[in-house]
Image (cartoon, rainbow, N blue to C red):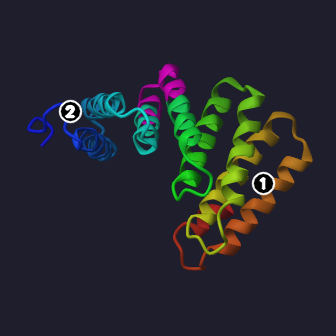
Amino acid sequence: AIDLTPDGHPLKASRLNELADVLRIRFALLGQLDDLDSAVSAIQRATTIDPSDAIFLHNTGNAFRARFESLGDFKDLEISITAYGKAVGITPTGHINRTLFLSSLGNALCFRFSRIHRLDDVEEAIRIVSIAVDSTTDDNQNKPELLNRLGSACLLRWTHDHRAEYLEHAICATRQAVGLTPPDHPQRLGYHQ
């Protein structure tokens, strides 16, 4: 469909974005690096066509983060963080996707902290994920995952200097995640760890 879609067509960028998504999924299933490289290429083409689409920017972050996780090239993580940051920056408060973008950025910052131990990264991750948590109602199905991410970020921060306040924040957020998760939900067990 992409080859049949001429340059300048209003759906070209969307089709490239969709291609990047399915290639990234196939990479996750089969582990073929060509799929991941093709996903990165497709999403870069999409963001070149429409650099102001937050979904495209978020998916750029996803593709580069997946490549970082597979190959360990730190430049990919940096590109991922930049793309997530741009997605957050152009998405208005209250938009349905903003919490997802904030959570992804916070997670990527935690990845970077885990590698280079720059305290600003984990502190910014805690701040960003806290915004996502605070802007999500308790009945939202994503709230437990956001709380779990916040707890994980606080625990990661605690590992830096063992300040008790971060351990307490981690425990509190994780307890909230457990409390909001139905007893038979498969994620619930993961929140206990």
Q: Which residues are magenta?
A: 65-79
Considering every residue shown, the one lying at the far right of the view is: 164
Q: Secondary structure at mark 2?
A: loop
Packing grade of label 2 (10 A; few <14, some 14-19, many >=20) is few
Considering every residue shown, the one lying at the far bottom of the view is: 183
- Horizontal relation, residue 29 to residue 134: left or right: left
Residue positioned 29% across, 40% down in the render: 20
Q: How far is the residue under mark 2 from the one under mark 1?
A: 49 Å
Residue positioned 73% across, 41% down in the render: 156
Q: Secondary structure at mark 1?
A: helix
Q: Residue 110: which quarter of the image? A: top right
Please state which amino acid type lies under the numbered disc 2.
Gly
Query: Which residue has dot 2 on it?
Result: 8
Query: Which residue has dot 1 on it?
Result: 170
Q: Which secondary structure dominates the residues rendered in magenta?
A: helix
165 is within the stretch colored magenta: no
Closer to the camera: disc 2 or disc 1?
2
> Between residues 2 and 25, which one lies in front from this camera angle?
2
Residue positioned 31% across, 31% down in the render: 49
Please state which amino acid type lies under the numbered disc 1.
Ala
Locate residue 6, reporting x and y percent: 13, 34
> Between residues 13 and 22, which one lies in front from this camera angle?
13
Quadrant where the C terminus sits is bottom right
Query: Does residue 97 sit above or below 47 in this rendering?
Result: below
- Horizontal relation, residue 106 to residue 56: left or right: right
Locate residue 186, reporting x and y percent: 51, 70
Locate residue 189, reporting x and y percent: 60, 67
